[in-house]
Amino acid sequence: MTIERTSTTKIREIVSALNRADLTAIDYNHLLTQVGILIKGIPLIVQSLPVGTTLYRGRICSERLCEVSYLGSPPAELVTSFQRCNGPGKPMFYASVDIAAVFSELNADVGNIVYLSSWIVDREFFYFRIPPGAGEGMEDDVAFSKIETFFETRFAQPVHETFSAQYKLTSAITEKLSTGNVLGPPEQLKGRPLGAVVYPSVAHTSRSDNIAIQTLVAQSCLRLSDVREMEVMERQAESLTVREINFSSNFEDEHIKWLGRPRQWTLNSMETLSFTVENGAWVARTEDGTIINPS
């Protein structure tokens, strides 16, 4: 079934109105409706996050974390206003493919203790990238170009508060692109849920990919791999110096079993490892290329 597209004239009218809107006063459901009209009938490229992908998430906390629950999405009652990709009472799982971007997004400063957790994708899921990719034949489409620029501009705007009405529009875009039947009925997805958007980091100079995942999708598709307790020692214009204090990959009974030391790699007799930095993290491999995880 072909869905009739919204006209280019209507798209221009909606984009102009949303750019002028007072986001502190406008109704959120109206924004959802308008975003839905913008993308109606326009083919957009959806992507899936492969099994085995590592995502990083961070929290600044003055007291040592002992419960696994503190590493994931916050409780709904603590989300009191709009964040970049979610509305009040609708927490999402924010993460990044780049450790450095996590520290930048947290605005970590000297003396802060950051709990950096690593999460492995165990079940494939779908996401839309911001700006969305054009479907076949849409590369030079005027209407798509207008939507692409509008979405990208909105997600690129720096907002310095954690909670702000200025995020109301990006939250509406995220909700439309990460929930519902945008991709068709569930049986067509072959068990792979739609539940995330990927967007470039505003805080990090390299513009690394950040991802916002619907909480239920994160809970069903991600596995906590390990967590590091890290102290920020020095901050310069575009870099941080940090030291690892503690490490855990044991989460028995939903408790973090800290080792009381930084992570380390253990070598067998006559074994050698080669180390590379990938997405801001050390990766150790044996001579045949097998990745060795720290303990």
Image (tube, rainbow, N blue to C red):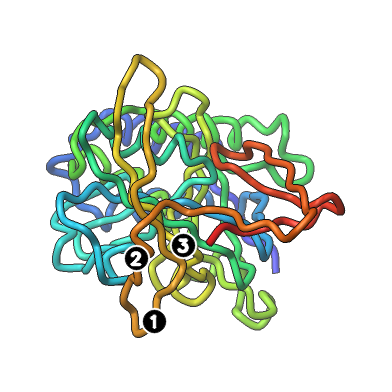
Q: Quadrant of residue 281?
A: top right
The disc, 3 or 2, on the residue closer to the chain's N-terminal end is 3
| Residue 113 in the image, given as x and y percentages of width and height | 25, 44
Q: CA distance from mark 2 to mark 1?
A: 11 Å
Q: Residue furthest top?
A: 237
Residue receiving disc 3: 226
Query: Disc 1 designates what residue?
Result: 252
Marks 2/1 in contact by CB < 8 Å: the verdict is no
Residue 257 in percent (x, y) is at 35, 71
In the rendered structure, which disc, 2 or 1, sits on the residue that comes first in sequence? 1
| Residue located at (30% from left, 24% from top) | 234
Q: Secondary structure at mark 1?
A: helix
Quadrant containing the N terminus in the rendered view: bottom right
How many other residues sit within 10 Å of disc 2, few (<14), some (14-19) or many (≥20)?
some
Q: Secondary structure at mark 2?
A: loop
Amino acid type of the residue that numbered disc 3 sits on in the rendered structure: Asp
Q: Residue drawn at (68%, 56%), measured in percent from left and top?
A: 267
